[in-house]
């Protein structure tokens, strides 16, 4: 793969530093933005041309999904990779519907990210997740995420739809989903 100019949008400074260094060691130029506003400022003000964008799903209290359309409006050929520690089928589908090129759960290493940007690995990832049975906790997490997406992120409406107390749902949302096997750290060169 030839050298890429990558926009990395994530509010975790340790993760962005680690991933940007790993990508730079592999010969790619990385520009880091810690918020959606900073990412749009990089694209518009600097008038830079990016080949790809890696966007975290959760950027503080905002969603990285909302950043997809403005970035594609500025750069229609931009390959957007959604990267998140809160992976679910519902958010992956929503990201692809909005125009993301691919979607990966954290932790994802530099080589795994580059492979996802190189080809449309969504079908491959879907096949890989079905090789091992999914745990009940993971299924519950994905179902909650699906219902939450259907209700545009409204926790109260989601709790009513699921027939559970709002505080119970908030506790479940605060927990990370169970980790699937085979995950690698972000700093693999």
Image (tube, helix red, strand yellow):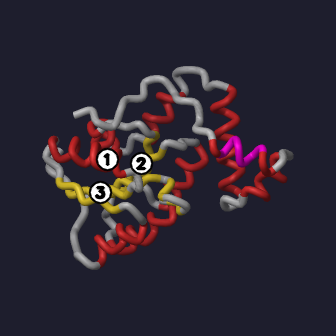
Q: Local crowd at mark 2 within 10 Å, few (<14), some, or many (≥20)?
A: many
In magenta, the rendered stretch is 168-173
Q: Are marks 2 and 1 in contact (CB under 8 Å)?
A: yes
Compare residues 170 and 24 and report the one nearer the observer: 170
Dot 3 corresponds to which residue? 52
Q: Secondary structure at mark 3?
A: strand
Compare residues 97 and 21 and report the one nearer the observer: 21
- Residue at x 67%, y 48% (from the top left corner): 146
Dot 2 corresponds to which residue? 102
Residue 95 forms part of the magenta stretch: no
Mark 1 or mark 3: name the one nearer the start of the chain.
3
Q: Indicate the position of residue 37 as horizontal and vertical percent values.
A: 41, 71
Q: Indicate the position of residue 120 as horizontal and vertical percent values.
A: 37, 45
Q: Are marks 1 and 3 in contact (CB under 8 Å)?
A: yes
Would you say 59 lies left or right of 188 here? right
Q: Secondary structure at mark 2?
A: strand
The prevailing secondary structure element of the residues shown in magenta is helix
Mark 2 or mark 1: name the one nearer the start of the chain.
2
Q: How many marks?
A: 3
Q: Local crowd at mark 3 within 10 Å, few (<14), some, or many (≥20)?
A: many
Dot 1 corresponds to which residue? 117
- Residue at x 30%, y 77% (from the top left corner): 44
- Residue at x 17%, y 47% (from the top left corner): 24
**Does 68 sit above or below residue 167?**
below
**Residue furthest to the bottom:** 45
Compare residues 58 and 82 and report the one nearer the observer: 58
Mark 3 or mark 2: name the one nearer the start of the chain.
3
Q: Indicate the position of residue 172 as horizontal and vertical percent values.
A: 69, 41
- Residue at x 53%, y 29% (from the top left corner): 179
Quadrant of the image containing the C terminus: top left
Would you say 185 lies left or right of 130 here? left
Q: Indicate the position of residue 170 as horizontal and vertical percent values.
A: 71, 48
């Amino acid at each position: 793969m030839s050298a890429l100019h990558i926009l990395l949008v994530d509010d975790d400074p340790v993760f962005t530093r680690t991933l940007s260094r790993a990508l730079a060691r592999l010969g790619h130029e990385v520009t880091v933005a810690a918020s959606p506003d900073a990412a749009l400022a990089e694209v518009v003000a600097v008038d830079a041309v990016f080949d790809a964008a890696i966007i975290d799903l959760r950027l503080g209290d905002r969603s990285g999904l909302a950043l997809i359309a403005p970035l594609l409006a500025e750069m229609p050929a931009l390959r957007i990779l959604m990267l998140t520690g809160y992976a679910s089928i519902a958010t992956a589908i929503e990201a692809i519907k909005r125009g993301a090129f691919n979607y990966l759960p954290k932790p994802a290493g530099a080589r795994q990210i580059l492979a996802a940007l190189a080809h449309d690995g969504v079908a491959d990832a879907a096949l890989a997740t079905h090789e091992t049975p999914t745990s009940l906790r993971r299924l519950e997490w994905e179902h909650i995420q699906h219902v939450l997406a259907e209700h545009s992120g409204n926790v109260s409406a989601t709790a009513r739809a699921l027939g559970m107390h709002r505080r119970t749902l908030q506790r479940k949302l605060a927990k990370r989903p169970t980790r699937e096997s085979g995950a690698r750290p972000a700093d693999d060169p």
